[in-house]
Amino acid sequence: MSVVGIRRLILHCLKAGRLLLAGLVFALPVFTSATFASTAFAGQSPLIFGVFPNLSPKVLVETYRPLADFLQDRLQRRIEIYSAPDFRTFAANTARGDYDLLLTAPHLAWLARQDAGYRPLLKYAEPVHGVLVVRADSPIQTTAQLRGKLIAIADPLAVVVMAMQAQLRAQGLAPGSSIQMENAQSHNNAAMRVFSGGVEAAILGAQPYRRLPAEVQSGLRILAETPSLSSQMFLTHPRLREQEALAVRQMLLVYAATSEGRAFMERGGFGGFAELDGRELLAFKTYALEVQAQLKAPR
């Protein structure tokens, strides 16, 4: 594809609210140009892998390209990795069924099944939790001292943010009145707002927190944590036949057992794969309905 063609593709994706992730300067696709044909996916178009935008596009590419390349090789079907500019757009894209293979947060997984019929495959085994951080040298020692302060959040739709806000609300700190929230639009941005002194505190996920540069992480201090929550989940759109969905699931498990897959799990702090069924999603219905209400509200 020419540079002009690539730029047109980028503009089309941005206008549609879809972000094609890539590892090169001109957003070259993350797949090779070879043509594949396998038993499960013979003669089919590329499989669109939608990845939850909890990290920057660059970090998402670095994280998921090895997995996508492995699936592409084993399934013999081109894999295109897409995300979105923000959680809200990603959830809307999911509801439209834009993604064939979906990796998303548990409350958005509930919505994906409810709105578009996505089928659960697997989840990351390592639970996640939210952290409330302040600068390491901050005089704030308790959450009560945050009253009247400005707190940066990764995104209003992030499950770790919702869980921490519920925890603060139970302590008498109601978002929007007792404390103010600023949408930093990513976990990294939220952390950097505190590190730079722009806000008093931030709410982000523990895994993104652990992946911050050492200098930034050492300049922050965890003030509070949420209980453990189920991690991100893999689902497939119902347009994939059962044979195809099972093939994807099998290859995910095969990848996790390889040396490359084990390194992938260790780098991401994912803890391998674990079984997932629809009943587990019910625990996130309350958060999912809150997301649904926010999606229907005007921006």
Image: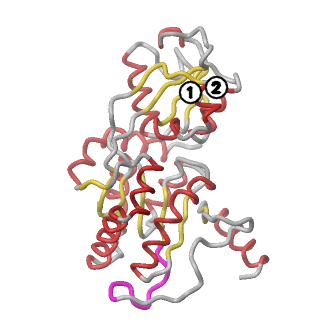
Confirm or deny contact between disc 2 and disc 1 (CB under 8 A).
Answer: yes
Q: Amino acid at mark 1?
A: Ala
Task: Determine whether the residue tagged by mark 1 lies in a helix, strand or loop.
Answer: strand
Which residue occupies the foreground of this view, 260 or 129? 260
Mark 1 sits on what residue?
A: 202
Task: Determine whether the residue tagged by mark 2 lies in a helix, strand or loop.
Answer: helix
Give percent across and percent down for residue 194: 64, 25
> Quick check: 299 above or below 121?
above
Mark 1 residue crowding within 10 angstroms, few (<14) / some (14–19) / many (20+) = many
Q: Quadrant of residue 126?
A: top left
Residue numbers of the magenta segment: 39-47
Q: What is the distance, in whole Å, between disc 2 and disc 1 at their CAs?
A: 6 Å
Q: Quadrant of residue 224?
A: top left
Most common secondary structure along the magenta stretch: loop
Q: Residue at x 38, y 85 (%)?
A: 41
Which residue occupies the foreground of this view, 144 or 225? 225
Q: Amino acid at mark 2?
A: Val
Give percent across and percent down for residue 233: 36, 54
Mark 2 sits on what residue?
A: 194
> In the rendered view of the protein, which quadrant contains the C terminus?
top right
Q: Residue at x 25, y 45 (%)?
A: 282
Question: Mark 2 or 1 closer to N-term?
Answer: 2
Q: Is residue 2 magenta?
A: no
> In the rendered view of the protein, which quadrant contains the N terminus?
bottom right
Q: Is residue 15 left or right of residue 282?
A: right
Q: Is residue 167 left or right of residue 279?
A: right
Q: Is residue 130 left or right of residue 56?
A: left
Mark 2 residue crowding within 10 angstroms, few (<14) / some (14–19) / many (20+) = many
